[in-house]
Amino acid sequence: MNKKQIIYLDNAATTPVDPAVFKKMQPYFFEKYGNPSTVYKLGEESKFAVERARKQIADFLKCSSDEIYFTGSASESDNWIISGVINKILEKEKNPHIIISSIEHKAIIEPAKNYQRKGLIELTLLPVNKDGLVELEELEKAIKKNTKLISIMYVNSEIGTIQPIGEIGSLIKKINDKRKEKIIFHTDAVQAINYIDCDVQKLGIDALSLSGHKIYGPKGIGSLYIKKRISVDSLIYGGGQERNMRSGTENVPGIVGLGEAISKIKISDGKRIKILRNKLITGILKDIPNSQFNGSMEKRLPNNAHISFSGAEGESIVMELSQKNIFVSTGSACASNSLNPSHVLTAIGLSHEESHCSIRFTLGKQTKDSDINFVLKVLPKIVERLRKISGR
Amino acid sequence: MYSKKVIEHFQKPKNMGKLKNPDVVAEVGNPRCGDIMKLYLKIDKDKIEDISFETMGCVAAISTSSMITEMAKGKKLAQALKISYNDVAEELGTLPPVKMHCADLAVKALRKAIGIYKEKLKIKN
């Protein structure tokens, strides 16, 4: 973009890199470009930087460094945990049972469904209630003798609802205490990292996916935490990097950026953002008739607002806002390549029209009060115009 | 992703809104796909004297609605029936492949309206 001011309210899609993070990354593109697998000084420097970042992530998740693996994205981390666990189990026994929620990211749903299609696993897609939350009793009922892996995302990327991960962790721990073959509990925490507690020990998490570009770090870098003693197959074979678990020369600048980004997170930042987010929601619901707020208000990330505007289609709203340099996203199928309404919005019981007419606003640490004021000024007119065109 | 012309028609749609005393009204689309198009036509001696639309849908749905009203206005019914979705897309410059169905929907709306009108005429006579 040029220097024209933009209002970026799509921080759940990606975030800008923090300049301080970029500064730390820079030397690893230029002077310190050594391959971490080499033994001379230049390579050692890179190796040291990778291990420092690993420690930064471990400190954040309250685990040990050797439980952290770097990947190319959170999608890779998600794919890896699904296939890594299943492949390992299939070496010994047939037809393991896997439970995932119906609002998981596609990076969990698609690999799991792929195993199901091949007849290799039994898969349960756990429904959520209208607030977008997994219910503990439903989860407990779904667990079977052959259940081996449960994956529930910490925060949903569309509606921002926070799952009771700690309670799920305790439930699984309680069940595991009576079992010889333990159930592995994974969570995709991509959206959660910025705002809520991700202490894996306290929450009882065995595996966790995270990503750099959602936390003011670079794109193309993710991580997977795997608790010690949990047996997982590799996804990428080759030179044996990452303690023989994930081959491929390390993305050193990316890793350094991820480490810096995670160490800069202040959970308390959420307070300021929440005030702005609430102002946005209240303003919209007050000034735009027939607007409807979606998902739980309490169990929700502080930066997410998800609203349907009946009679005004989502992609049209996005494009109108875009003309004014305001960037948001929609659950409307029209904005996707699939032409199907979002599986998340359908899962929480939204009608097709409500899904198509929905807008997601996700604030970030760069969001200012004046940004919210401007959105509240222009949005009512946009919705009004589109409703005039639709005659609804 | 959209051509200048598509955005133009989206921002300043032609022939938008209800028509007073239309001879025929036709609606196509469904909430599942997200696009609902409604056309209002005034027809005199086999000619489309006036036409307008109401569309709930994406940028492409609104632009193709606007475009088809422009293309059909003043045409004889037989000519109007010949308008294809490719014609609509071409008039708009380009449409992303995934949005071609919007042009198709606009054509279907027009053909449906003319069909209903012809049926009505038969019953009258």
Image (spheres, rainbow, N blue to C red):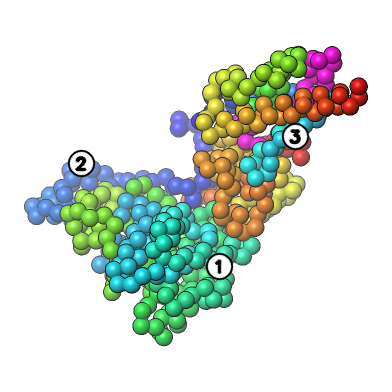
Q: Are marks 3 and 1 in contact (CB under 8 Å)?
A: no
Give the x, y percent position of residue A263: 35, 59
Q: In this rendering, which labeled residue sits more in front, label 3 or label 1?
A: 3
- Which residue is at the front of the view, A236 or A30? A236
Give the x, y percent position of residue A347: 59, 58
Quadrant in which the N terminus of chain A is drawn? top left
Q: Give the Cα distance between marks 3 and 1.
A: 40 Å
| Amino acid, disc 3 | Glu
- Under circle 3, the secondary element is strand
Q: Are marks 2 and 1 on the same chain?
A: yes
Task: Report in which chain the residue with disc 3 lies.
Answer: B
| Residue A233 part of the magenta-drawn span | no
Identify the residue position indicated by label 2 in the image. A30
Magenta part of the chain: B39-63
| Residue B46 part of the magenta-drawn span | yes
Quadrant in which the C terminus of chain A is drawn? top right
Residue extending farthest left: A40
| Amino acid, disc 2 | Phe
Q: Which labelled disc corresponds to residue A134? A: 1
Q: Is residue A338 above or below residue A260?
A: above
